[in-house]
Image (tube, rainbow, N blue to C red):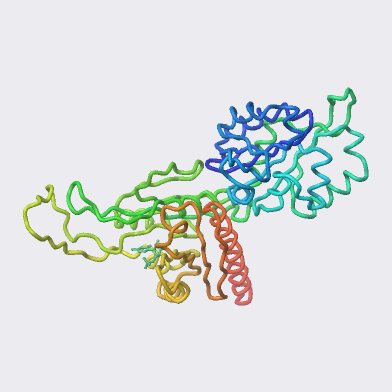
Amino acid sequence: MIPMTNKHIVLGVTGGIAAYKSAETVRRLRDAGAEVRVVMTRAATEFITPLTMQAVSGHPVHRQLVDTQAESGMDHIELARWADGVLVAPASANFIAKLAQGIADDLLSTLCLATEAPVAVAPSMNRQMWTSPATQSNLSTLQNNGIRLFGPASGAQACGETGPGRMLEAEELAALTAAMFETGELAGLRVLVTAGPTWEPIDPVRIITNRSSGKMGYAVATAAMEAGARVTLVTGPTALTPPERVDCIRVMTAQEMFDAVQQHITSAQIFVGAAAVADYRPAHAASGKIKRTADSLSLNLVRTPDILASVSALDPAPLVVGFAAETSDLELNATAKLRAKRADLIAANIVGQPGSGFEADENRLVLIDERGTLALPLLSKAAAARELIHHIAVLYHAKNSAENSRLAHRQ
Ligand code: C5P
Protein backbone atom coordinates (compact mmCIF):
# COMPACT_ATOMS: atom_id res chain seq x y z
CA MET A 1 0.00 0.00 0.00
CA ILE A 2 1.32 3.49 -0.76
CA PRO A 3 1.45 5.65 2.36
CA MET A 4 -1.15 8.35 2.90
CA THR A 5 1.08 10.60 5.01
CA ASN A 6 -0.76 13.84 5.76
CA LYS A 7 -3.65 12.93 3.44
CA HIS A 8 -6.96 14.34 4.60
CA ILE A 9 -9.63 11.66 4.40
CA VAL A 10 -13.30 12.21 5.19
CA LEU A 11 -14.89 8.92 6.19
CA GLY A 12 -18.65 9.07 5.63
CA VAL A 13 -20.65 6.54 7.63
CA THR A 14 -24.25 5.79 6.61
CA GLY A 15 -26.89 3.63 8.27
CA GLY A 16 -26.05 -0.02 7.78
CA ILE A 17 -25.02 -2.83 10.09
CA ALA A 18 -21.49 -2.73 8.63
CA ALA A 19 -21.11 0.63 10.40
CA TYR A 20 -19.81 -1.43 13.31
CA LYS A 21 -16.63 -1.88 11.22
CA SER A 22 -16.16 1.87 10.70
CA ALA A 23 -14.06 2.34 13.82
CA GLU A 24 -11.63 -0.22 12.41
CA THR A 25 -11.62 1.58 9.06
CA VAL A 26 -10.55 4.80 10.80
CA ARG A 27 -7.75 2.90 12.53
CA ARG A 28 -6.45 1.41 9.30
CA LEU A 29 -6.59 4.77 7.48
CA ARG A 30 -4.69 6.40 10.31
CA ASP A 31 -2.16 3.54 10.38
CA ALA A 32 -1.48 4.38 6.73
CA GLY A 33 -0.70 7.97 7.76
CA ALA A 34 -4.01 9.67 6.90
CA GLU A 35 -5.70 12.31 8.98
CA VAL A 36 -9.35 11.31 9.28
CA ARG A 37 -12.53 13.29 9.93
CA VAL A 38 -15.76 11.36 10.31
CA VAL A 39 -19.14 12.45 8.96
CA MET A 40 -22.13 10.37 10.11
CA THR A 41 -25.68 10.35 8.82
CA ARG A 42 -28.45 10.26 11.42
CA ALA A 43 -29.14 6.60 10.65
CA ALA A 44 -25.46 5.72 11.12
CA THR A 45 -25.61 6.90 14.73
CA GLU A 46 -28.15 4.12 15.40
CA PHE A 47 -25.46 1.54 14.59
CA ILE A 48 -22.30 3.02 16.11
CA THR A 49 -21.95 5.93 18.49
CA PRO A 50 -20.34 9.24 17.47
CA LEU A 51 -18.33 8.97 20.68
CA THR A 52 -16.63 5.81 19.43
CA MET A 53 -15.86 7.46 16.10
CA GLN A 54 -14.58 10.58 17.87
CA ALA A 55 -12.31 8.48 20.06
CA VAL A 56 -10.74 6.56 17.18
CA SER A 57 -10.41 9.53 14.83
CA GLY A 58 -9.27 11.96 17.51
CA HIS A 59 -11.73 14.63 16.28
CA PRO A 60 -15.37 15.50 16.91
CA VAL A 61 -17.74 13.81 14.50
CA HIS A 62 -19.55 16.00 11.95
CA ARG A 63 -23.24 15.29 11.82
CA GLN A 64 -25.30 18.29 10.82
CA LEU A 65 -25.47 20.37 7.70
CA VAL A 66 -26.30 23.47 9.66
CA ASP A 67 -24.31 23.28 12.82
CA THR A 68 -25.40 26.28 14.85
CA GLN A 69 -23.16 25.24 17.73
CA ALA A 70 -20.26 24.85 15.26
CA GLU A 71 -19.20 22.11 17.67
CA SER A 72 -16.98 20.53 15.09
CA GLY A 73 -15.57 23.81 13.78
CA MET A 74 -15.87 23.20 9.99
CA ASP A 75 -18.86 23.62 7.71
CA HIS A 76 -19.62 21.44 4.68
CA ILE A 77 -17.70 23.64 2.26
CA GLU A 78 -14.66 23.80 4.52
CA LEU A 79 -14.77 20.03 4.96
CA ALA A 80 -15.22 19.55 1.21
CA ARG A 81 -12.11 21.67 0.60
CA TRP A 82 -10.17 20.07 3.45
CA ALA A 83 -10.65 16.58 2.00
CA ASP A 84 -8.06 15.02 -0.27
CA GLY A 85 -10.38 12.03 -0.58
CA VAL A 86 -13.83 10.96 0.61
CA LEU A 87 -14.68 7.36 1.46
CA VAL A 88 -18.29 6.48 2.24
CA ALA A 89 -18.19 3.15 4.08
CA PRO A 90 -20.66 1.67 4.59
CA ALA A 91 -22.68 3.21 1.78
CA SER A 92 -26.34 2.20 2.09
CA ALA A 93 -28.61 1.66 -0.94
CA ASN A 94 -30.44 4.83 0.12
CA PHE A 95 -27.23 6.88 0.18
CA ILE A 96 -26.12 5.52 -3.19
CA ALA A 97 -29.52 6.50 -4.63
CA LYS A 98 -29.21 10.01 -3.22
CA LEU A 99 -25.71 10.45 -4.56
CA ALA A 100 -26.75 9.20 -7.99
CA GLN A 101 -29.50 11.82 -8.11
CA GLY A 102 -27.44 14.65 -6.66
CA ILE A 103 -29.72 15.01 -3.67
CA ALA A 104 -28.04 17.09 -0.99
CA ASP A 105 -30.27 16.93 2.06
CA ASP A 106 -27.74 16.18 4.77
CA LEU A 107 -24.10 16.92 5.54
CA LEU A 108 -22.59 13.84 3.89
CA SER A 109 -24.54 14.04 0.61
CA THR A 110 -23.88 17.80 0.38
CA LEU A 111 -20.19 17.31 1.05
CA CYS A 112 -19.92 14.67 -1.68
CA LEU A 113 -21.42 17.14 -4.17
CA ALA A 114 -19.28 20.03 -2.99
CA THR A 115 -15.87 18.37 -3.00
CA GLU A 116 -13.31 18.34 -5.80
CA ALA A 117 -11.56 15.41 -4.12
CA PRO A 118 -12.06 11.85 -5.36
CA VAL A 119 -15.07 10.12 -3.78
CA ALA A 120 -15.44 6.37 -3.26
CA VAL A 121 -18.36 4.34 -1.95
CA ALA A 122 -18.14 0.95 -0.26
CA PRO A 123 -21.63 -0.51 -0.53
CA SER A 124 -23.09 -2.63 2.21
CA MET A 125 -26.54 -4.13 1.81
CA ASN A 126 -28.62 -7.26 1.54
CA ARG A 127 -27.90 -9.22 -1.67
CA GLN A 128 -31.42 -8.63 -3.00
CA MET A 129 -31.08 -4.87 -2.51
CA TRP A 130 -27.66 -4.99 -4.19
CA THR A 131 -28.88 -6.84 -7.28
CA SER A 132 -32.08 -4.76 -7.62
CA PRO A 133 -32.22 -2.90 -10.96
CA ALA A 134 -32.62 0.43 -9.14
CA THR A 135 -29.38 0.00 -7.16
CA GLN A 136 -27.50 -1.31 -10.18
CA SER A 137 -28.58 1.61 -12.35
CA ASN A 138 -27.70 4.09 -9.56
CA LEU A 139 -24.25 2.50 -9.36
CA SER A 140 -23.63 2.90 -13.07
CA THR A 141 -24.66 6.54 -12.78
CA LEU A 142 -22.18 6.99 -9.93
CA GLN A 143 -19.38 5.35 -11.86
CA ASN A 144 -20.17 7.44 -14.94
CA ASN A 145 -19.89 10.48 -12.68
CA GLY A 146 -16.38 9.43 -11.68
CA ILE A 147 -17.25 8.04 -8.26
CA ARG A 148 -15.27 4.95 -7.40
CA LEU A 149 -16.81 1.72 -6.22
CA PHE A 150 -15.00 -0.33 -3.57
CA GLY A 151 -16.49 -3.84 -3.43
CA PRO A 152 -18.81 -5.18 -2.29
CA ALA A 153 -17.62 -8.65 -1.40
CA SER A 154 -19.74 -11.76 -1.45
CA GLY A 155 -20.39 -13.88 1.60
CA ALA A 156 -22.46 -14.34 4.72
CA GLN A 157 -24.65 -11.34 5.47
CA ALA A 158 -26.00 -9.98 8.73
CA CYS A 159 -29.54 -10.84 7.58
CA GLY A 160 -28.61 -14.53 7.44
CA GLU A 161 -28.41 -14.73 3.65
CA THR A 162 -25.33 -15.34 1.55
CA GLY A 163 -24.43 -13.37 -1.57
CA PRO A 164 -23.04 -10.06 -2.87
CA GLY A 165 -23.41 -6.91 -0.81
CA ARG A 166 -20.96 -7.40 2.04
CA MET A 167 -18.79 -4.40 2.78
CA LEU A 168 -15.04 -4.90 2.24
CA GLU A 169 -12.86 -5.24 5.32
CA ALA A 170 -11.17 -2.18 6.82
CA GLU A 171 -7.72 -3.22 5.62
CA GLU A 172 -8.91 -3.51 2.02
CA LEU A 173 -10.75 -0.20 2.22
CA ALA A 174 -7.62 1.58 3.46
CA ALA A 175 -5.51 0.05 0.65
CA LEU A 176 -8.07 1.04 -2.00
CA THR A 177 -8.32 4.55 -0.55
CA ALA A 178 -4.53 4.90 -0.78
CA ALA A 179 -4.65 3.64 -4.37
CA MET A 180 -7.05 6.50 -5.28
CA PHE A 181 -4.03 8.78 -5.17
CA GLU A 182 -1.93 6.67 -7.55
CA THR A 183 -2.28 7.88 -11.12
CA GLY A 184 0.60 6.14 -12.87
CA GLU A 185 1.00 9.19 -15.14
CA LEU A 186 4.74 9.37 -14.45
CA ALA A 187 5.37 5.63 -14.14
CA GLY A 188 8.95 4.70 -14.93
CA LEU A 189 10.22 8.30 -14.80
CA ARG A 190 12.60 9.96 -12.40
CA VAL A 191 11.74 13.34 -10.96
CA LEU A 192 14.07 15.63 -9.04
CA VAL A 193 12.39 18.22 -6.81
CA THR A 194 13.99 21.02 -4.81
CA ALA A 195 12.11 22.37 -1.80
CA GLY A 196 12.34 24.70 1.16
CA PRO A 197 14.53 27.72 1.81
CA THR A 198 18.30 27.82 1.88
CA TRP A 199 20.38 29.07 4.80
CA GLU A 200 23.30 31.31 3.94
CA PRO A 201 25.62 31.74 6.93
CA ILE A 202 26.68 35.19 8.09
CA ASP A 203 28.60 33.80 11.03
CA PRO A 204 28.30 30.54 13.03
CA VAL A 205 24.97 31.60 14.60
CA ARG A 206 23.31 33.85 12.01
CA ILE A 207 21.93 33.17 8.58
CA ILE A 208 20.17 34.82 5.66
CA THR A 209 17.04 32.89 4.76
CA ASN A 210 13.43 33.41 3.66
CA ARG A 211 9.92 32.43 4.67
CA SER A 212 9.60 29.28 2.57
CA SER A 213 8.10 26.42 4.61
CA GLY A 214 8.85 23.73 2.01
CA LYS A 215 5.20 22.62 2.01
CA MET A 216 4.68 23.15 -1.73
CA GLY A 217 7.85 21.31 -2.76
CA TYR A 218 7.12 18.40 -0.41
CA ALA A 219 3.56 18.22 -1.82
CA VAL A 220 5.01 18.16 -5.36
CA ALA A 221 7.38 15.33 -4.39
CA THR A 222 4.48 13.37 -2.89
CA ALA A 223 2.24 13.91 -5.93
CA ALA A 224 5.06 12.85 -8.28
CA MET A 225 5.60 9.70 -6.22
CA GLU A 226 1.87 8.97 -6.32
CA ALA A 227 1.97 9.43 -10.09
CA GLY A 228 4.41 6.52 -10.19
CA ALA A 229 7.72 8.40 -10.49
CA ARG A 230 10.92 7.71 -8.58
CA VAL A 231 11.48 10.92 -6.73
CA THR A 232 14.57 12.57 -5.30
CA LEU A 233 13.85 15.51 -3.03
CA VAL A 234 16.68 17.95 -2.41
CA THR A 235 15.51 19.98 0.54
CA GLY A 236 16.72 22.98 2.44
CA PRO A 237 16.04 23.14 6.19
CA THR A 238 12.31 22.69 6.98
CA ALA A 239 10.21 21.43 9.87
CA LEU A 240 8.54 18.84 7.63
CA THR A 241 8.85 15.06 7.57
CA PRO A 242 9.95 13.94 4.11
CA PRO A 243 7.36 11.84 2.28
CA GLU A 244 7.91 8.10 2.51
CA ARG A 245 9.31 6.34 -0.55
CA VAL A 246 11.07 9.52 -1.68
CA ASP A 247 14.89 9.73 -1.65
CA CYS A 248 15.61 12.75 0.48
CA ILE A 249 18.85 14.75 0.38
CA ARG A 250 19.18 17.46 3.00
CA VAL A 251 21.21 20.55 2.23
CA MET A 252 21.66 23.94 3.82
CA THR A 253 23.09 26.48 1.40
CA ALA A 254 22.29 27.34 -2.23
CA GLN A 255 25.73 26.02 -3.21
CA GLU A 256 25.03 22.68 -1.50
CA MET A 257 21.63 22.51 -3.22
CA PHE A 258 23.30 23.26 -6.55
CA ASP A 259 25.88 20.52 -5.97
CA ALA A 260 23.24 17.94 -4.97
CA VAL A 261 21.13 18.78 -8.04
CA GLN A 262 24.16 18.57 -10.36
CA GLN A 263 24.96 15.18 -8.91
CA HIS A 264 21.50 13.68 -9.38
CA ILE A 265 20.00 15.49 -12.37
CA THR A 266 21.48 13.36 -15.14
CA SER A 267 19.23 10.41 -14.30
CA ALA A 268 16.05 12.55 -14.07
CA GLN A 269 13.63 13.25 -16.89
CA ILE A 270 11.81 15.98 -14.96
CA PHE A 271 13.13 18.75 -12.71
CA VAL A 272 10.85 20.80 -10.47
CA GLY A 273 12.55 23.72 -8.72
CA ALA A 274 10.16 24.55 -5.90
CA ALA A 275 12.88 25.69 -3.50
CA ALA A 276 13.11 29.35 -2.53
CA VAL A 277 16.84 29.53 -3.14
CA ALA A 278 18.58 32.56 -1.67
CA ASP A 279 19.67 34.78 -4.55
CA TYR A 280 22.57 36.27 -2.58
CA ARG A 281 24.82 35.04 0.20
CA PRO A 282 27.41 36.79 2.35
CA ALA A 283 30.68 36.80 0.44
CA HIS A 284 32.49 35.56 3.54
CA ALA A 285 30.94 33.88 6.54
CA ALA A 286 32.72 35.11 9.68
CA SER A 287 34.45 32.29 11.52
CA GLY A 288 33.47 33.64 14.94
CA LYS A 289 30.24 35.29 16.14
CA ILE A 290 30.11 38.93 15.00
CA LYS A 291 30.00 41.12 18.11
CA ARG A 292 27.43 43.86 18.62
CA THR A 293 29.93 46.73 18.84
CA ALA A 294 29.79 48.85 15.68
CA ASP A 295 26.87 51.27 15.12
CA SER A 296 26.30 49.91 11.68
CA LEU A 297 27.33 46.83 9.83
CA SER A 298 27.49 46.14 6.09
CA LEU A 299 27.36 42.73 4.59
CA ASN A 300 28.94 42.18 1.23
CA LEU A 301 26.62 39.86 -0.69
CA VAL A 302 27.43 37.81 -3.79
CA ARG A 303 25.14 35.96 -6.19
CA THR A 304 24.39 32.30 -5.59
CA PRO A 305 24.31 29.87 -8.53
CA ASP A 306 20.98 29.75 -10.40
CA ILE A 307 20.10 26.08 -10.06
CA LEU A 308 17.11 26.18 -12.39
CA ALA A 309 18.95 27.95 -15.19
CA SER A 310 21.87 25.55 -14.85
CA VAL A 311 19.51 22.58 -15.30
CA SER A 312 17.87 24.20 -18.38
CA ALA A 313 21.34 24.66 -19.86
CA LEU A 314 22.11 20.92 -19.74
CA ASP A 315 22.21 19.00 -22.99
CA PRO A 316 20.04 17.02 -23.03
CA ALA A 317 17.95 18.95 -20.50
CA PRO A 318 15.12 17.36 -18.56
CA LEU A 319 11.67 18.93 -18.59
CA VAL A 320 12.23 21.98 -16.40
CA VAL A 321 9.57 23.41 -14.12
CA GLY A 322 10.20 26.52 -12.07
CA PHE A 323 8.23 28.43 -9.49
CA ALA A 324 7.75 32.16 -9.46
CA ALA A 325 6.74 33.83 -6.24
CA GLU A 326 5.67 37.34 -7.13
CA THR A 327 4.22 40.22 -5.20
CA SER A 328 2.79 41.94 -8.33
CA ASP A 329 2.33 41.57 -12.12
CA LEU A 330 2.18 37.81 -11.73
CA GLU A 331 1.73 36.74 -15.34
CA LEU A 332 4.10 39.30 -16.79
CA ASN A 333 6.92 38.44 -14.42
CA ALA A 334 6.31 34.70 -14.69
CA THR A 335 6.31 34.78 -18.49
CA ALA A 336 9.58 36.71 -18.44
CA LYS A 337 10.98 34.08 -16.07
CA LEU A 338 9.83 31.25 -18.36
CA ARG A 339 11.90 32.73 -21.19
CA ALA A 340 14.89 33.95 -19.14
CA LYS A 341 15.36 30.59 -17.45
CA ARG A 342 14.43 28.57 -20.56
CA ALA A 343 11.98 26.58 -18.45
CA ASP A 344 9.18 24.46 -19.93
CA LEU A 345 6.68 25.54 -17.31
CA ILE A 346 6.43 28.12 -14.56
CA ALA A 347 4.07 27.71 -11.60
CA ALA A 348 3.45 31.22 -10.42
CA ASN A 349 1.81 32.44 -7.27
CA ILE A 350 1.28 35.72 -5.54
CA VAL A 351 3.01 35.92 -2.18
CA GLY A 352 2.68 38.41 0.63
CA GLN A 353 -1.11 37.96 0.88
CA PRO A 354 -2.74 36.09 3.74
CA GLY A 355 -3.96 32.51 3.13
CA SER A 356 -1.83 31.66 0.11
CA GLY A 357 1.85 31.26 -0.73
CA PHE A 358 4.61 30.94 1.87
CA GLU A 359 3.78 29.07 5.09
CA ALA A 360 0.06 28.71 4.18
CA ASP A 361 -1.58 25.33 3.60
CA GLU A 362 -3.33 26.52 0.47
CA ASN A 363 -2.07 27.97 -2.76
CA ARG A 364 -3.45 29.57 -5.90
CA LEU A 365 -1.16 28.62 -8.78
CA VAL A 366 -1.07 30.00 -12.29
CA LEU A 367 0.61 27.59 -14.71
CA ILE A 368 2.37 29.31 -17.58
CA ASP A 369 4.03 27.69 -20.57
CA GLU A 370 4.56 28.55 -24.23
CA ARG A 371 1.05 27.33 -25.06
CA GLY A 372 -0.73 29.59 -22.62
CA THR A 373 -1.88 30.17 -19.07
CA LEU A 374 -3.95 28.03 -16.75
CA ALA A 375 -5.18 29.62 -13.52
CA LEU A 376 -5.95 27.02 -10.86
CA PRO A 377 -8.42 27.85 -8.09
CA LEU A 378 -7.37 28.20 -4.45
CA LEU A 379 -6.52 24.62 -3.47
CA SER A 380 -4.78 22.79 -0.66
CA LYS A 381 -1.09 22.52 -1.51
CA ALA A 382 -1.59 18.75 -1.89
CA ALA A 383 -4.38 19.27 -4.45
CA ALA A 384 -2.47 22.05 -6.22
CA ALA A 385 0.57 19.75 -6.43
CA ARG A 386 -1.54 16.97 -7.96
CA GLU A 387 -2.88 19.39 -10.59
CA LEU A 388 0.64 20.58 -11.31
CA ILE A 389 1.95 17.02 -11.66
CA HIS A 390 -0.92 16.17 -14.01
CA HIS A 391 -0.06 19.22 -16.13
CA ILE A 392 3.64 18.25 -16.10
CA ALA A 393 2.78 14.69 -17.17
CA VAL A 394 0.72 15.95 -20.12
CA LEU A 395 3.52 18.33 -21.11
CA TYR A 396 6.20 15.66 -20.76
CA HIS A 397 4.33 13.08 -22.83
CA ALA A 398 3.43 15.65 -25.51
CA LYS A 399 7.07 16.80 -25.74
CA ASN A 400 8.31 13.22 -25.90
CA SER A 401 5.93 12.08 -28.60
CA ALA A 402 6.83 15.17 -30.66
CA GLU A 403 10.51 14.35 -30.14
CA ASN A 404 9.96 10.69 -31.09
CA SER A 405 8.14 11.55 -34.30
CA ARG A 406 10.86 14.11 -35.18
CA LEU A 407 13.49 11.38 -34.75
CA ALA A 408 11.39 8.91 -36.76
CA HIS A 409 11.18 11.44 -39.65
CA ARG A 410 14.93 11.87 -39.67
CA GLN A 411 15.53 8.15 -40.06
O1 C5P B 1 14.59 34.09 -10.22
P1 C5P B 1 13.72 33.57 -9.16
O2 C5P B 1 14.43 33.28 -7.89
O3 C5P B 1 12.49 34.36 -8.89
O4 C5P B 1 13.19 32.18 -9.77
C1 C5P B 1 12.45 31.27 -9.03
C2 C5P B 1 12.67 29.90 -9.56
O5 C5P B 1 14.05 29.68 -9.79
C3 C5P B 1 12.27 28.84 -8.59
O6 C5P B 1 11.83 27.71 -9.31
C4 C5P B 1 13.55 28.54 -7.82
O7 C5P B 1 13.54 27.24 -7.27
C5 C5P B 1 14.58 28.71 -8.91
N1 C5P B 1 15.88 29.23 -8.43
C6 C5P B 1 17.00 28.41 -8.50
N2 C5P B 1 18.20 28.88 -8.09
C7 C5P B 1 18.34 30.14 -7.66
C8 C5P B 1 17.24 30.99 -7.60
C9 C5P B 1 16.01 30.49 -7.99
O8 C5P B 1 16.85 27.25 -8.89
N3 C5P B 1 19.52 30.55 -7.27
Above-or-below relation of 269 to 117: below
In the rendered image, residue 38, in percent from the top left (x then y), is placed at 64, 37
Q: Residue furthest front?
A: 68
> Is residue 382 among the parts visible in the rendering?
yes
The residue located at (12%, 60%) in the rendering is 297
Residue lying at 90% horizontally and 37% vertically, measured from the top left: 129
Quarter that holds the C terminus: bottom right
Q: Give 206 or 248, whichever is nearer the viewer.
A: 206
Q: Is residue 16 left or right of residue 37?
A: right
Above or below for 165 versus 329: above
Q: Residue 246: where, in percent of width, then height?
A: 48, 45
Image-quarter location of ligand 1: bottom left
Percent of width and height locating residue 354: 44, 58
Q: Is residue 156 visible?
A: no
* Residue for point 75% across, 27% down: 47
Q: Is residue 108 left or right of residue 135?
A: left
Q: Which of these two is toward me, 60 or 195?
A: 60
**Quadrant of res 330:** bottom left
Quarter containing the N terminus: top right
Which sits in the foreground, 111 or 384? 111
